């Protein structure tokens, strides 16, 4: 003791760190410095909140009467280490011209050193979620990198910790491991090379056809275009399905919901719409959320076989993927669509389906300990879909005039459209196509319920020819539905009513359409003109598909110019209408005679 008191302090060393060192640590540092200086050293601790997990020592001789200044600084703070690494690289660049060996050396010496205030530590990890402490300045939606290289995205900011969703195998992340900020929001690579490919929710190819060269990098969360940036929806986006194009036309830039129970042909409608875009310079994006991998593989194969894959992209987050990937998949698809929309192209995006997306988000929210609301969904589940669907737009000409049409799909339980998620999405979209199990099983496919379906864009999204041809089909069908109940008494009905019923039945039969056989515009116009002109009334309902096929083939041969005119100009004059009617009447008279 006496020895120590009399020992003269020759070196003073100031230790800056966030926490006070233990006696043992202090002793080790003292020994280290005494070895360096060969003099006695005194360590004085000063708190430095910015030192992060590291520390810094400033040491210098203590000369009585003169001002102390350090002559050596040992910087083991994260910032210091990265500075040192930069210095090393600079030195190496000066000394050597051999780039390869320089890179090898740099890689060999490289130790990832994040800046002090941007490093946190994992508190808990599990179920695709990690809670992290120490990232005080992190932002919502920012990407973070875990020590093992896996990325995550911040989805929850609390006072003392943050919640991240993990994009990858969480088993590699351990409690206490380091997490770094990137100061970037999550994004996805985009580009033309993605056409014809199947990718996962992060844009990585999953079809085994090698890497994809990206043209750009788009944030997955992007604000929707404002009012000035948009123009009204006025161009048709034909689905090729008579039941939809005639009564619930969809415009470019519109959001039309496809809603129905399981196995009612929801995906089939979206798929036919994609097939119908062939040769129309529309980019199609199909986002599969929480589906069976086998269904998606089958869909991709169908598109490939029908040469539709070359203008399509499939984003697949199957049921086996984590809720995290299922949650970001539609946003990633939307970002890809935006890339093409900003280039002035027309895009069709299908979200199949948003009920599973809501369920994935509910899983994440519950794991993030947000309070559950109705049906255990979090309070912001409306915003979840509104911010996604609002990104579909028809851009103004100043912005290139591109468009993104969205066909979100929602699955109902036992036809209940008043459940939480269906009502939410119905109120966001510009209309819905309601598919009914009963109709589907009765053979009415596509099983569109004409009474409950609606398109809020309406006639603005139809060509003049279609508008003229459709006439009062909705009204006729509504009348038929009302009279349908009298069908059971058909023997007691008068002839006029019987004829009216036959007419309605014929119309319903005409609206049935085989899968993968979308109609061209002129075909729809011809069928509608003929049907509304009561041409099909005397034909028994089961024969209508065959007769309509025959009529179309005959018209294509005999009235080729008219067909081309309708397809190219979208116009139908009164004379043209009369020509079609006369031709159809004549055609059926001849076939009747032939039989
Ligand atoms: P899920 O709820 O499983 O997603 P879904 O509502 O998407 O089902 P689809 O998979 O599109 O339904 O269709 C179910 C079945 O009905 C499929 O086998 C499909 O081939 C058949 N189908 C759909 N539309 C038609 C149609 N217009 N004509 C004949 N068959 C059809
Ligand atoms: Mg489906």
Image (cartoon, helix red, strand yellow):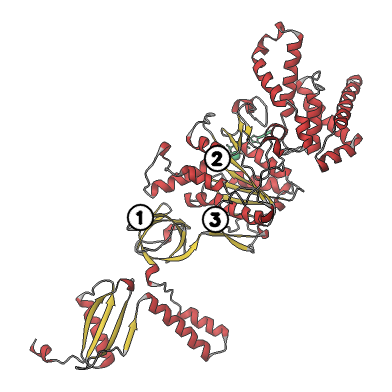
Residue at image x 83%, y 35%? 572
Using the rendered view, name the quadrant where residue 117 is placed.
Answer: bottom left
Residue at image x 57%, y 87%? 98
Asked if residue 148 can be seen in this view, the reply is no
Q: Quadrant of ligand 1?
A: top right
Location of mark 3 (residue) = 220
Using the rendered view, name the quadrant where residue 467 is placed.
Answer: top right
Location of mark 2 (residue) = 428
Label 2 to label 3, Cα distance in Å? 20 Å
Location of mark 1 (residue) = 158
Labels 2 and 1: the sequence-earlier one: 1
Q: Element type at marker 1? A: loop
| Badge 2 vs badge 3, beta-carbon distance below 8 Å | no
Labels 1 and 3: the sequence-earlier one: 1
Up/down of 472 relative to 258, above or below: above
Residue at image x 81%, y 37%? 522
109 vs 228, nearest the viewer:
228
């Amino acid at each position: 003791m006496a020895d120590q008191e009399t020992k003269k302090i020759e070196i003073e060393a100031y230790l800056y760190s966030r926490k006070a060192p233990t006696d043992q640590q202090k002793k080790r540092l003292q020994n280290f410095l005494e070895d360096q200086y060969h003099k006695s050293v005194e360590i004085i601790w000063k708190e430095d909140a910015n030192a992060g997990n590291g520390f810094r020592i400033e040491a210098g001789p203590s000369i009585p009467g003169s001002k102390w200044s350090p002559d050596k600084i040992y910087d083991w703070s994260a910032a210091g280490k990265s500075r040192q690494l930069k210095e090393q690289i600079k030195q190496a660049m000066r000394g050597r011209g051999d780039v390869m060996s320089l890179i090898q050396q740099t890689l060999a010496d490289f130790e990832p050193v994040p800046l002090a205030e941007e490093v946190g530590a994992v508190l808990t990890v599990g179920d695709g979620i990690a809670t992290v402490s120490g990232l005080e300045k992190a932002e919502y939606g920012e990407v973070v990198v875990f020590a093992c290289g896996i990325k995550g995205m911040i989805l929850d900011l609390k006072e003392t910790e943050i919640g991240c969703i993990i994009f990858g195998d969480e088993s590699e992340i351990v409690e206490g491991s380091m997490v770094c900020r990137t100061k970037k929001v999550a994004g996805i690579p985009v580009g033309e090379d993605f056409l014809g490919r199947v990718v996962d929710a992060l844009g990585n190819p999953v079809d085994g056809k090698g890497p994809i060269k990206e043209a750009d990098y788009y944030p997955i969360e992007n604000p929707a275009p404002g009012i000035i940036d948009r123009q009204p929806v006025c161009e048709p986006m034909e689905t090729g399905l008579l039941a939809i194009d005639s009564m619930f036309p969809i415009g470019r830039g519109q959001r039309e919901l496809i809603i129905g129970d399981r196995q009612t042909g929801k995906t089939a409608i979206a798929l036919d719409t994609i097939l119908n875009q062939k040769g129309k310079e529309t980019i199609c994006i199909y986002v599969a959320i929480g589906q069976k991998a086998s269904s998606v593989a089958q869909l991709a194969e169908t598109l490939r076989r029908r040469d539709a894959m070359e203008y399509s992209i499939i984003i697949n987050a199957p049921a086996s993927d984590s809720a995290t990937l299922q949650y970001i998949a539609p946003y990633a698809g939307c970002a890809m669509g935006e890339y093409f929309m900003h280039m002035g192209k027309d895009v069709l995006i299908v979200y199949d389906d948003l009920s599973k997306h809501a369920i994935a988000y509910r899983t994440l929210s519950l794991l993030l300990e947000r309070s559950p609301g109705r049906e255990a969904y979090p309070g912001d589940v409306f915003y979840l879909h509104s911010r996604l669907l609002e990104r579909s737009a028809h851009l103004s000409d100043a912005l290139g005039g591109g468009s993104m049409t969205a066909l979100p799909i929602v699955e109902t339980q036992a036809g209940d459209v008043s459940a939480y998620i269906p009502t939410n999405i119905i109120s966001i979209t510009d209309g819905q196509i309601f598919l009914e199990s009963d109709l589907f099983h009765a053979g009415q496919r596509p099983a569109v319920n004409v009474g409950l379906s609606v398109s809020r864009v309406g006639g603005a999204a139809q060509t003049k020819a279609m508008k003229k041809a459709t006439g009062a089909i909705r009204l006729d069908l509504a009348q038929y539905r009302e009279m349908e109940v009298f069908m059971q008494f058909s023997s007691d009905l008068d002839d006029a009513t019987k004829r009216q019923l036959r007419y309605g039945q014929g119309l319903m039969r005409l609206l049935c359409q085989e899968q993968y056989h979308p109609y061209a515009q002129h075909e729809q116009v011809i069928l509608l003109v003929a049907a509304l002109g009561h041409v099909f009334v005397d034909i028994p309902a089961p024969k209508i598909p065959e007769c309509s096929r025959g009529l179309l083939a005959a018209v294509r041969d005999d009235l080729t110019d008219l067909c081309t005119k309708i397809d190219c100009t979208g116009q139908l004059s009164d004379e043209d209408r009369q020509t079609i009617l006369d031709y159809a009447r004549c055609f059926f008279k001849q076939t009747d005679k032939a039989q």
